[in-house]
């Protein structure tokens, strides 16, 4: 097993993602208007092909139970203002990039940028999965990660 490997899963190199299901400012505005419980019931549905009907959706619902509106807004601001695109060229690690082809949070351009700018990378695309590949195809995902790490 190598400690020098990197896994990029359901991510990209910038926070304000063109093509995201809605701009971050819209998510922040709706969070303020609707409150956290309505926003937290709305946004995580986008992370599954089956929305809140996915058998593992409850894990996302449980994860945000005690998150305040301020905390959520601060996370969105941090995400919105973050960019690591210029640093990708410095990543030398063997890198696995995992993406679901129905992900509306990070589109193909985002993971393609990672794959092209990280020299020692490979992209694995999960068909008919959204942002939470690890919850939609857990066995396939876990086997891929184990094989990559070993």
Image (spheres, rainbow, N blue to C red):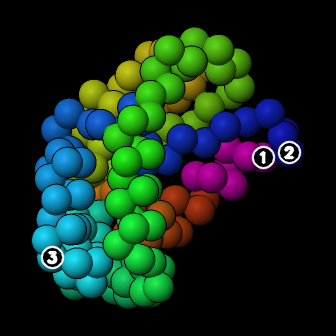
- Give how far across and how far down residue 33 sits, in percent: 13, 71
- Give how far across and how far down residue 145 sits, in percent: 63, 52
The verdict on residue 145 being magenta is yes
* 72 left or right, relative to 118: left
Quadrant where the image shows the N terminus: top right
**Labelled disc at residue 1:** 2
Secondary structure under tag 1 reads: loop
- The CA span between labels 2 and 3 is 46 Å
* Front in this rendered view, residue 64 or 92: 64
What's the residue at 16%, 38% (across, down)? 19
* 69 left or right, relative to 90: left
**Mark sitting earlier along the chain (2/3):** 2
- The CA span between labels 1 and 3 is 45 Å
The verdict on residue 70 being magenta is no
Instruction: Tell me: residue 106, above or below residue 138.
Output: above
Secondary structure under tag 3 reads: helix
Report which residue position mark 3 lands on: 34
Instruction: Tell me: residue 38, above or below residue 1.
Output: below
* 95 left or right, relative to 77: right
**Labelled disc at residue 104:** none
What's the residue at 57%, 12% (across, down)? 89
Q: Are marks 2 and 1 in contact (CB under 8 Å)?
A: yes
* Front in this rendered view, residue 113 or 96: 113
Q: Are marks 1 and 3 in contact (CB under 8 Å)?
A: no
Camera sees residue 129: no
Dominant secondary structure, magenta? helix
Residue extent of the magenta highlight = 144-150
**Front: mark 1 or 3:** 3
* Front in this rendered view, residue 14 or 134: 14
**Front: mark 2 or 3:** 3
């Amino acid at each position: 097993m190598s400690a020098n490997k990197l896994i990029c899963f359901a991510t990209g190199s910038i926070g304000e993602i063109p093509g995201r299901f809605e701009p971050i400012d819209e998510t922040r505005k709706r969070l303020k208007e609707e409150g956290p419980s309505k926003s937290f019931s709305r946004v995580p549905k986008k992370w599954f092909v089956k929305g809140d009907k996915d058998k593992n959706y409850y894990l996302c619902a449980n994860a945000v139970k005690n998150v305040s509106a301020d905390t959520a807004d601060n996370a969105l601001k941090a995400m919105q203002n973050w960019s690591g695109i210029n640093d990708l060229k410095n990543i030398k690690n063997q890198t696995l990039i995992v993406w679901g082809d129905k992900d509306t949070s990070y589109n193909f351009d985002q993971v393609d940028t990672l794959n092209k700018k990280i020299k020692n990378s490979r992209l694995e695309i999960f068909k008919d999965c959204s942002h939470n590949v690890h919850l939609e195809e857990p066995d396939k995902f876990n086997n891929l990660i184990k094989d990559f790490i070993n």
